[in-house]
Image (tube, coloured by chain):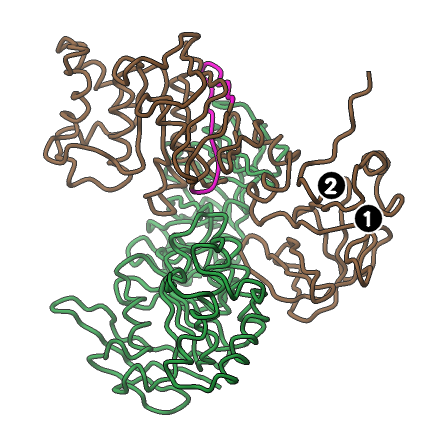
Chain colours: A brown, B green
Amino acid sequence: MAEVKLVSLKKSFGDVGALKEIDIDVKDKEFFILLGPTGAGKTTTLRLIAGLDKPDKGDIFLDNLRVNDFPPAVRDVAFVFQYYTLYPHYTVKQNLEFPLKSNLRKTPRDIIDKKIDEVSKILHIEHLLDRPTVNLSGGEMQRVAIGRAIVRTPKVFLMDEPLSNLDAKLREEMRAELARLHLDLGETFFYVTHDQTEAMTMGDRIGVLNEGKLLQVGTPDEIYNKPANTFVAKFVGSPMINLLDSEIEGEKLVIGKRDRAMECTLNDYQCKLVGNAKSKSVVLGIRPEDIIVSKEKQQLNSFEASVYFKQSMGVEDILNLKVTDELIFKAVTPPKFMANVGDKVFANFKMDRSHIFDLESGNRLELKKEN
Amino acid sequence: MAEIVLENIYKRFGSMTAVNNLNLEIKNTEFVVLLGPSGCGKTTTLRMISGLELPDEGKILLDGEDVTFKRASQRDIAFVFQLYALYPQMTAFGNMSFPLRAQGYSKEKINEEVNNAAELLKIKHILNKKPRELAGGDMQRVALGRALVRRPKVFLLDEPIGTLDAKFREEMRTELKKLHVDIGATTVYVTHDQTEAMSMGDRVVVMNKGILQQVDTPQDIYHSPKNLFVAKFIGSPGMNFVTCIPFRNGEGKVSLKVLAVDAVVAIPEKLQKILIDKNKIDKEMILGIRPEDISIEFKETQNYLKSEIFVIETLGSYNIIDLKLGNEIIRVRTLPTVVPDISSTAFIGFDMDRASLFDKETENSIM
């Protein structure tokens, strides 16, 4: 059992990394990911949970126990850092044993051996146990660092960008391994990253943090398909969502104020949404994969554009389409579509998959719940 | 106009050969990316093009002129490392005009050039601000502007966006590419990030240990890697590799025995012919197959291999399903709606028309 509950947690020091009253409820056995850009307050949150810093305000509960005044050592959390902090001249085994031999635990020898045996099997490092850590590769070192956290059987694993120092290939492998490790261990993970791919692929739920404010908490599916505001919409997903300033005109969205370059017809639900909108100025959010490119004009919401430039990603091409000098957006096509720079094409907006945000606040338009 | 030709270039540091007999032609207005892991020789190559480093052997031609032993300042080339390095005490205008002032241009000329660059980069409104007042993206744009005002023949960029957050890197990739399309200056860009290389380069030059591995368009590098190194380096998630042995079955046809699960898969005739012609029957080969070229079924299917669901990675617009094929992990790209149970059984089939085969010993593609 390990729940983490943060209530109105606040911490200020300068501007960067400050935290403005956030509430997070992490369930037992959950893989929770706090996602945000540099300086959002992610690491600050982790350090508060671990007890390395004191909050200005608010409470931290571990399993319903308020731990604000507990020193780090008795909070029973394990920290895995971005930079593996191993003892270089110890062997892998000695590094793994270290937390168990501390005065706080004084674990008997046979239990230590049993634990190390288990953990090294889970992490596939049995063959490395007698090696000094200086000779290990980056991925192996990070496995040992995680192993050292596991042997302690803490209530919660706190992880601060543990993959960001690994090269791209290794990061890909470790992502899957960590996700699986979480399933196999059945423990609570609280993981911090700026990489939306890590968040989407590993998290049970994601909290998006920016400038000390928690903008949305949800499953990867919710965050991707129902972003609460333009920041979340933009931060999650690659290639990035297109955000196009628009004006509501009856049951249409007009994009491009002066030249009325595009007029999008809304579906029934969206008509209701814009009917209740406070302001006529909105932002249409549409992901590049929800714009279908064709050579012929289609019936609805089909707009002429020219191919400005192309980004070949191998598995797909990203076309940067230009309607006017100010109106450029991205669409994804399969490589076999074969568009060339300068070609005239049609961009077909799947409006059912689009999002509408208020221009000023950036918040998603929602219908008020009817009572 | 700027065309760069490198002929038989060698550069050694002590006993280490940093660049080993490099031949490369960069066309006018082309965006060429030098891609490889650290120590592959990509930065050394860039420094030799700029004149900051001299080759031990070989020739460098800039628009046909031999510049091998010319100083950096005589080559009319702008070198940008990290885009961030701005002078903090100067405004954006001051930073951008710096190279022109250093060259003694008139005030009118400086104003005109800076304004043109600012227009292109859409930063006219921030010209009076100092770097600390600017958002990260605008700082990058000012740094780019500073390189632009010189109107150099060639832009040389060395991992300019490597230290930024992932999201911001994505924005800058598009912006740099757009800028290149707009001004059309020859650009040589160094990176270890394959996504940057693919998304910006007209052509990609893959290097490893000082040796050029392949030069091609992003599409060709992706679909027809020349060797195992290139195949591993390009693509995210990366290509899957399966060790196998081609053999003749009872009917005389060539099939592949997949060692990880001791199973046999049939292959198209074209592939059979290549294996026979190249004399690869009964020799260990490595089959390379991209995640999008594998299909997944949940019942036994002919020519599919039994495997177990290890992890599901959701990415919004698609899923990556990691499966265990014997002890190997295989990644399959699927629609976001495919969400099988962890540890359940699945069957995977390879689209052999899109597969690559590599010789296990030489690591070269036989395709």
The quadrant where residue A45 appears: top left
Q: Nearer the viewer, residue B110 or B223?
A: B110
Q: Residue furthest right?
A: A250
Q: Using residue A90 as the reference point, say whether residue A71 is left or right of it.
A: right
Q: Is residue A87 magenta?
A: no
For the point 46% across and 50% down, which residue is it?
A: B254
Q: Is residue A27 magenta?
A: yes
Q: Residue furthest left?
A: A89
Q: Nearer the viewer, residue B359 or B217?
A: B217
Percent of width and height locating residue B309:
48, 28
Looking at the figure, which quarter contains the C terminus of chain B? bottom left
Whether A227 is drawn above or below B13: the answer is: above
Same subunit, labels 1 and 2: the answer reads: yes
Residue under label 1, please give it.
Answer: A253
Q: Amino acid at mark 2?
A: Ile
Please say whether residue B224 is visible from this viewpoint.
no
Please say whether residue B272 is visible from this viewpoint.
yes
Percent of width and height locating residue B114:
51, 75
Mark 1 vs mark 2, CA separation in Å: 10 Å
The disc at residue A356 is 2
Badge 1 or badge 2: first in the primary sequence: 1
Whether B143 is drawn above or below A139: the answer is: below
Q: Using residue B279 as the reference point, say whether residue B117 is left or right of it.
A: right
Are discs 1 and 2 less than 8 Å apart at CB?
Answer: yes
Q: Which residues are magenta?
A: A23-38
The disc at residue B71 is none
Q: Amino acid at mark 1?
A: Leu
**Mark 2 belongs to which subunit?**
A
Percent of width and height locating residue B302:
57, 36
For the point 55% across and 46% down, which residue is it?
A: B292
